[in-house]
């Protein structure tokens, strides 16, 4: 019998990018909220995976324990304050999938303000979950039976290639430093290490 297949580790989380399903961005009491499904069950996603619980082990797909300890909404999976878009105020699994509601920060930092405006205008539609994904049914190797969610991010590319959101070129403010792509890659690697350390700290709590 085949062993359980797992995608992603604590050191290198796996990503799933999807279009926000049944989503909306709206203003409530002066705050801007985004809500919808970050992942849906019982139908193939853009990776060919079908999120569905393994009834012999559990009645759910999404493990949210670690995420709920610090439910931040990031931008492009970058764990840094200037890429913190807001906070997830509500998240749960139902028969459709992983529903969430998040409030955007009112920050005027260019990265955060830019992302908030793009989603508010409807140009950006992408949502990505990061974590450790388990495929425990050897008879159905494409069924995602357990997703340990580490974080949720806003991303520019949704699941539907026909509805790609092209982010307009951002002009950094005078106090911001433009970073070469190579340096950004190096910083991304360091940020992954920071995420790993953060997760380990949470486990010790």
Image (cartoon, helix red, strand yellow):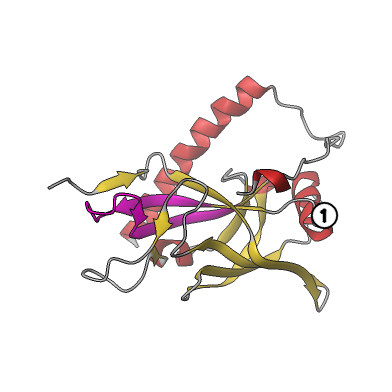
Q: Is residue 30 left or right of residue 42?
A: right
Q: Give the vertical position of 73 relative to 181 (above or below).
A: below
Which one is in front, 53 or 29?
A: 53
Q: Give the vertical position of 169 relative to 202 (above or below).
A: above
Residue drawn at (41%, 62%), measured in percent from left and top? 66
**Rendered location of residue 23, percent (x, y):** 68, 67
Secondary structure of the residue carrying tag 1 is: helix
Which one is in front, 54 or 72?
A: 54
Residue drawn at (41%, 44%), measured in percent from left and top? 196
Residue drawn at (21%, 70%), measured in percent from left and top? 56
Give the dominant element type of the magenta stretch: helix, strand or loop. strand
Q: Give the vertical position of 186 relative to 78 (above or below).
A: above
Question: Is residue 51 among what the camera can see?
Answer: yes
Question: Is residue 157 among what the camera can see?
Answer: no
Q: Which residue lies furthest to the bottom in this view?
A: 29
Task: Identify the residue position indicated by label 1 in the image.
Answer: 117
Residue drawn at (66%, 47%), measured in percent from left and top? 83
**Residue 34 in magenta stretch:** no
**Which of the 4 image quarters holds residue 65?**
bottom left
Q: In this view, does 195 lie to the left or right of 26?
A: left
- Numbered range of the magenta stretch: 129-153
Q: Is residue 61 left or right of residue 167?
A: left
């Amino acid at each position: 019998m085949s062993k359980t297949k797992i995608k992603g580790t604590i050191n290198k989380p796996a990503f799933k990018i999807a279009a926000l399903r049944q989503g909306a961005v709206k203003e409530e009491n002066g705050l801007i909220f985004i809500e919808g499904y970050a992942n849906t069950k019982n139908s193939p996603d853009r990776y060919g995976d079908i999120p569905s619980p393994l009834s012999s082990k559990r009645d759910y797909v999404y493990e949210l324990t670690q995420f709920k300890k610090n439910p931040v909404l990031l931008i492009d999976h970058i764990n840094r304050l200037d890429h913190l878009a807001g906070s997830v105020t509500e998240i749960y699994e139902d028969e459709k999938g992983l529903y969430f509601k998040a409030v955007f920060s009112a920050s005027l930092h260019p990265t955060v303000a830019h992302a908030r405006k793009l989603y508010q205008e409807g140009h950006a539609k992408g949502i990505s979950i990061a974590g450790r994904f388990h495929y425990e049914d050897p008879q159905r190797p494409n069924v995602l039976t357990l997703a340990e969610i580490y974080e949720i991010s806003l991303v520019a590319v949704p699941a539907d290639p026909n509805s790609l959101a092209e982010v307009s070129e951002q002009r950094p403010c005078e106090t911001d430093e433009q970073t070469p792509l190579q340096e950004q890659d190096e910083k991304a690697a360091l940020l992954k290490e920071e995420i790993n350390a953060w997760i380990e700290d949470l486990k010790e709590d």
